Image (cartoon, grey):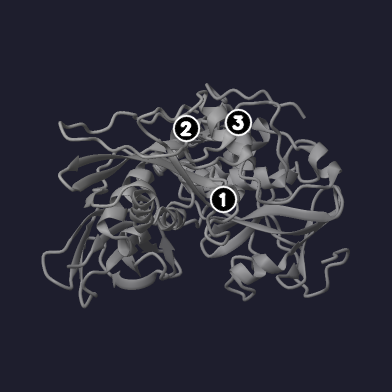
Amino acid sequence: MYRKKNFVSLGISLILAAGITVTPVTAADFTDGTVSGFNSEDTAEFGTQQETSDEEEITSGTEEGISEEASEESGSDEKDSDETEVFTEKMIPKSDVVPNNRQLLEEYLNDILYGQDPGTQPAASVGEDILNGQQQTLYEELKSKISAVASKGGSTRFKITSNLGLTWQTTVSGSALEREVAAHLKELDISKIIDCLAVDCPYELYWYEKTASTTWQYNYSTRRTGNKTTVKIENLSIHMPVTSSYASSTYKVNAQIVQLARMAAENARMIVKEFQDFTETEKLYGYKETICYLTSYNDDVTEADEYEYGDPWQLIYVFDGDDSTNVVCEGYSKAFQYLCDLSDITCYTVTGMMDGGTGEGPHMWNVVANNGRYYMADITNSDEGTVGEDGGLFLDTPISGSISRGYTYATDSSNIYFAYDKETKDLYGAGNKSVLYMTQDPYSADDLTAKPPKTSITGISNKTAGRLSLTWKKSKGAAGYEIYRRAGTTHPYVRAKVIKSGSTTKYTNTKLKKGQTYYYRIRSYRYDEKGRKIYSGWSTVKKQKVR
């Protein structure tokens, strides 16, 4: 199915004007019967000038080997002059430090797609806790350079410009001096710094080839006064290899990777803006129709029987404006989830097995929340020419089934069966309050209680030891707020306080551990007609260290 992809004007208002309506679905009798049919680069430049004085100058001796690959890629011979010598050392990071590159890219792209700026807010700060001052100086410079490369592409041959204080006096010379220089550099422990960066900036390092050698090169100069020699390590350069999927060369990240993600994010936001004045129900139908307009199903992938969920590009392909980049169910469902997230509409993405219509096999679809009830939303099978193009699988209720056995849905042509996989049930639970529990009540926009607007943390102050005072923006129509707190970067969020007044915009958190950094997020809530809380989305996380 060909789709003309035009983001200047999608004619979205015409989609609604053409007659998108909410048709009540009569809930059929529920059974707990078994669902049948399931089987579950640029050159690294090194200065060659040494410090000089009227006293005798000592230079280092023989040349150490430099990798042929580094030499070829830099475009220079990179041979030492008679006055100086370049030393090279290598390391391969611990294999368990950095996760899979594709997973890292997916999370990095999520940061871009959800409006964060990973280039200016790189991950956590474990390095700040365990590195000494000298190490932290190098750590901070590398963190900044790594973040810039992740965001804009470019060379990963990082020339260090910070003053690391690698200067000292000695009385030795020759090979003993070389060993002393190596020992001083070893104290800097560059491999430890790289490991900290891998933990603190995992997503910014989506391009890092952790199975290849990271190389650092340096030289040193000497200046002798009397019987003492002042030694200085200089021209330090760290070379971090790029995994081939995201490389234009061994030490250069392809900037197009991130540029495409930014373009897709902007296109998706244009869609959300087009629908900003419509009701939630109109938005849901409009998003479904727009996604089906923009993309087509990639039959070649499923015919090859090689597809696995987790492709970070599936979401981007929907919004990239390129007719040649079609998707499978993962793209349809993640695109719908994304537009809902940008609109603060509660939506979930689930996986499992589908049987009927196009046949049996793994599938991904969505669940939409409406006042504590949950509805099927299969965007893939709502596209033209599919079994649910009549709307039978969108905001629908099943004719029979349960979470454990799966659900059966009726369409104009046949009954379709959906069963959640173990991972989905483990994630969302299997009780009658789970988001996987499909309601018997027809979807209705009439009793839909609108979410309160998101709030945002405007400040966190630490004027008193052991206390943090939070302020936030008032959310119009909110009945109150819930504040969640996390200690450090590894602990889970816990609820710190429930504010039972929508007009309150300040809270002081007491009895906090001195020296600990705390992370906070907040959401507003109001009550529906049955007294249930309806929550806004979460605010952006803010952090503060306790003095």
Q: Which residue is mark 2?
A: 155
Do the CB atoms of the residues marked 1 and 3 lie less than 8 Å apart?
no
* 116 left or right of 13 in image: left
Q: Which residue is mark 1?
A: 210
* 503 left or right of 253 in image: left
Considering depth in this image, is 112 or 148 the residue closer to the camera? 148
Name the N-terminal-most of marks 2 and 3: 3
Give residue 513's position: percent from left, percent from top: 24, 75
Amino acid residing under circle 2? Ser
- In front of the other: label 2 or label 3? 2
- Estimate the spatial distance between the alpha carbons at disc 2 and disc 1, rounded to whole Å: 17 Å
- Estimate the spatial distance between the alpha carbons at disc 2 and disc 3, rounded to whole Å: 46 Å
What residue is rendered at 44% in x and 55% in y?
A: 191
Q: Is residue 133 visible?
A: yes
Q: Is residue 480 visible?
A: no
What residue is rendered at 21% in x and 73% in y?
A: 514
Give residue 177's position: percent from left, percent from top: 34, 50
* 1 left or right of 113 in image: right
Considering depth in this image, is 366 or 476 the residue closer to the camera? 366
- Estimate the spatial distance between the alpha carbons at disc 1 and disc 3, rounded to whole Å: 48 Å
Residue 15's disc number = 3
Mark 1 lies on a secondary structure that is loop
Give residue 301's position: percent from left, percent from top: 79, 41
Name the N-terminal-most of marks 2 and 1: 2
Amino acid residing under circle 3? Ile
Amino acid residing under circle 1? Lys
Mark 3 lies on a secondary structure that is helix
What residue is rendered at 54% in x and 34% in y?
A: 70
Q: For the C terminus, which image quadrant?
A: bottom left
- In front of the other: label 1 or label 3? 1
Q: How many marks?
A: 3
Give residue 476's position: percent from left, percent from top: 29, 52
